[in-house]
Amino acid sequence: MAFAVTSSPAAISGSSFSRSSASSDLKIPQIGSFRLADRHATVNLSQKRCAVKPVNAEPKRNDSMLSHAATTSAPEVSEKVEVEDFEQLAKELNNASPLEIMDKALEKFGNDIAIAFSGAEDVALIEYAKLTGRPFRVFSLDTGRLNPETYRYFDEVEKHYGIRIEYMFPDAVEVQALVRSKGLFSFYEDGHQECCRVRKVRPLRRALKGLRAWITGQRKDQSPGTRSEVPVVQVDPVFEGLDGGDGSLVKWNPVANVDGKDIWNFLRAMNVPVNSLHAQGFVSIGCEPCTRPVLPGQHEREGRWWWEDAKAKECGLHKGNLKEDGAAQVNGNVATTESDIFNSQSLVTLSRTGIENLAKLESRKESWVVVLYAPWCPFCQAMEASYFELAEKLAGSGVKVAKFRADGEQKEYSKNELQLGSFPTILFFPKHSAKPIKYASEKRDVDSLMAFVNALR
């Protein structure tokens, strides 16, 4: 197994914290000792810091990140293990800098923690880890479908930091079965979850079974629908760690409270290499078929799985972020109790019967613009003002502006009959044509919407 190792520890200066040889000690119970088979050196786990030797040559890579500690023979616990309150720790560190949080994570878990690196701006985590002066490990999930630029970037990062990234790969038999049965691009038809489960979630699960903690680049501003409440540290609500069972894995999110623009300011200030895809308009970077550039003013997560609901934009790696937020399940769909949006006297509110009748008409007295929306969708909320302005501009022009709530019980109908792919979906019903025309652009400012309407009416 390859360990990403920095140079010898150096002191961190600053008003927030400092480190001496005494304060850096980890106070953990003695749980025995073991012998590293490939190093022929005995390490006593009663020591308060794990000793990690620098890598001088590329060792053999295993298909697991299982820690060397897992090869021990029934260690004896000599004292009662105290359970740490990570919810309280999260409160204590909520206003701490990413550097301080990273240092605390590496100090507590030593060689049993690793940084999850996706090949995007989360390279900031590696830079913070290097700045602590502590040894650290980095792993990444190679799904087999990443952009060529991302693979080249992995190599650049390894050379820049003098590390070896521990790559995890999907099971070849599972990938083969999925592709043979459903094709290479089934996720465009029935959602990305199945593909992500095979190519990302299961390899991640194997990786985390060899750790007691992991470090992610999640930020609250990345995805309003799923990450707005991410704490800086938490007991992982989904995955298990080395010891197995609930609560056996701790998840650190050092940049949870940092804005994206501040991450980029940090990367520029430290002259950190970045993925060349960022210069092409990519913000959030994942697999090549499921990632695209975003337009100015669009949220970064609009470049991921753009054909799906905004509230579902997690691949499963951070599934614990998904909450119903007061929602009730109605026939397998989420129907929320949140306040309605697009409330204006300028808009016509269509019921299910109303939208069905409108769709059946082969000849209409007036053209219609209809937005298919969900009140909980942040992208629907973001276009509310421009849609109001569109309605005002079209008042008296012979074009009606309407809304239809398409989540919950109406979602399946909307997908089958109204071309709903993701929220919001905007349709134009021409005056003398039965079939509605779907607005294909991601630009939702009033000028773009007016250009769409004027081209068709």
Image (tube, rainbow, N blue to C red):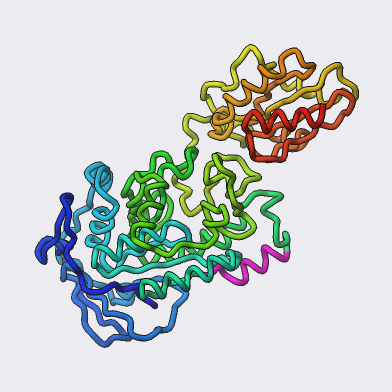
Given residues 453 and 339, the one toward you in this image is 453
Which residue is at a point 61% across and 15% down the rendered structure image? 344
Which residue is at a point 58% across and 47% down the rendered structure image? 294
In this rendering, position of residue 126 left or right of residue 407? left
Q: Identify the image quadrant of the C terminus.
A: top right
**Whole-percent x, y for residue 438 in the image:** 75, 36
Using the image, determine if residue 375 lies above or below residue 75. above
Q: Identify the image quadrant of the N terminus.
A: bottom left
**Whole-percent x, y for residue 84 in the image:** 22, 51
Using the image, determine if residue 286 lies above or below residue 221. below
In this rendering, position of residue 343 left or right of residue 453? left
Given residues 227 and 46, the one toward you in this image is 227
Find residue 214 and report its image quarter. bottom left
Which residue is at a point 25% across and 74% down the rendered structure image? 7
In this rendering, position of residue 453 left or right of residue 207? right
User: Magenta span: helix, strand or loop, mainly?
Assistant: helix
Find residue 361 and report its image quarter. top right
Which residue is at a point 72% across and 66% down the rendered structure image? 180
Residue segment shown in magenta: 169-180
Is residue 50 visible to us here? yes
Is residue 243 visible to us here? no
Outermost residue on the left side: it is 22
Given residues 341 and 191, the one toward you in this image is 341
**Whole-percent x, y for residue 162 in the image:** 36, 75
Q: Is residue 363 magenta?
A: no
